[in-house]
Each structure stands twice: as C-alpha cells, then as structure tokens.
Image: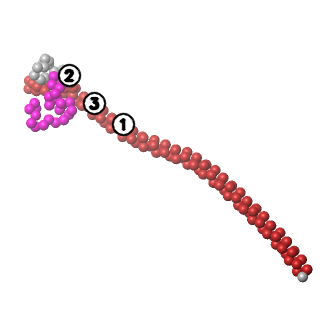
Amino acid sequence: MDELQYSESKALTSAKKYQMTVHSLELHAKQRENEIQATVDRWYNAGREEGYDEGSVEGFEDGRKAGLKEGLKKGRKQGLKEGFEEGQREERRNAAEKLDKYLATAETERTRRWAQSIYKGAGCSETTLGPSDSESVRCRLDSAVAVALRTQLPLSDDDEEW
C-alpha cells in the first residue's frame, strides 16, 4: 500500500508539474498571439495610411488632369460661341455701315426717298442721311422698321410702316 501511495503522490506531482508547464505554454502562446496581432494591426494601419496618402496624391493628380481637360473643352466651346457672336455683331455693324454709305451716295431719287422714309420720320429736323444713320436710327427709334433693322428681325405683313 505504501508503494502505491508513493506512486500516486509521485504521479500527482508529475501531473501538477505538467499542468503548470501546459498552462505556462498556453499563456506564452496567447501572449505571442497577442503580440503578433498587435504587430499585424500596426502594420495594417501604417499600410492603410500610406495607401491613403498615395491614393490621395494619385487621385488629386488624376482629378486635376481630368478637370483641366474638361475646363479646356468648356473654355474652347464658350470662346467659340462668344467669338461667333462677336463676329456676327461686327459683320452686322460692317453691313450697316456699307448700307449707310450706299444710301448716303444713292443716285436715284427713289432710293433717296426710301432711305428718308426709313431713317427720318415726321418731325425730324435732319434732312440728309449720314454714314451712321442705320446704326443709330436717330429719329424713329420706336418705329417697326427701325426695330427690325436694329434686331435683324423680319417685319410682319400687316405692319403699316413697311
């Protein structure tokens, strides 16, 4: 019996020793796992920040290039539109000046009377046409003909002045 009790006590001591070793190894493994997880998290966050910074710079450059391209496209379109409108105004002004010159130097009486009826209304003190009369239409600014000449719109058929 003594021998069995001695064996039992020796086995219990060995079991406790092995349990403490297993417990120590489990704690060490858990601590190592926590350290690995902390390292992975740290590197993940560092990589994420670095990726964000690189992506931000790359995205800014891409956006800048796309914005410049779009801005140039819109600018050209707007410039073309404004240039076309300015060209129309200049050509209308040139045409009005040429018409004024022609009417001022008209050789036929019929042309002179027609020009007088358009540019000089009743009560107008001026009797001769000048080179800028069609541009300003000084005496009959509110007449339908003058408005049509200024705005380049056709007159209606029922307009009495035409």
Which mark is drawn over residue 90? 3
Q: Earlier in the sequence, mark 2 or mark 3?
A: 3
Which of these two is toward me, 38 or 8? Answer: 8
Q: Residues within 10 Å of mark 1 (few under 14, many from 20)?
A: few
Q: Is residue 104 left or right of residue 80?
A: left
Which mark is drawn over residue 131? 2
Which of these two is toward me, 106 or 76? Answer: 76
Amino acid type of disc 2?
Answer: Pro
Q: Is residue 8 left or right of residue 74?
A: right
Name the element at disc 2: loop
In the picture, the quarter occupied by the N terminus is bottom right
The magenta segment is 137-162
The residue lying at 14 percent from left, 35 percent from top is 155
The residue lying at 88 percent from left, 78 percent from top is 5
Quadrant housing residue 127 = top left
Report the residue marked by disc 1: 79
Which mark is drawn over residue 98? none
Q: Residues within 10 Å of mark 3 (few under 14, many from 20)?
A: few
Q: Distance of mark 2 from mark 3, alpha carbons?
A: 16 Å
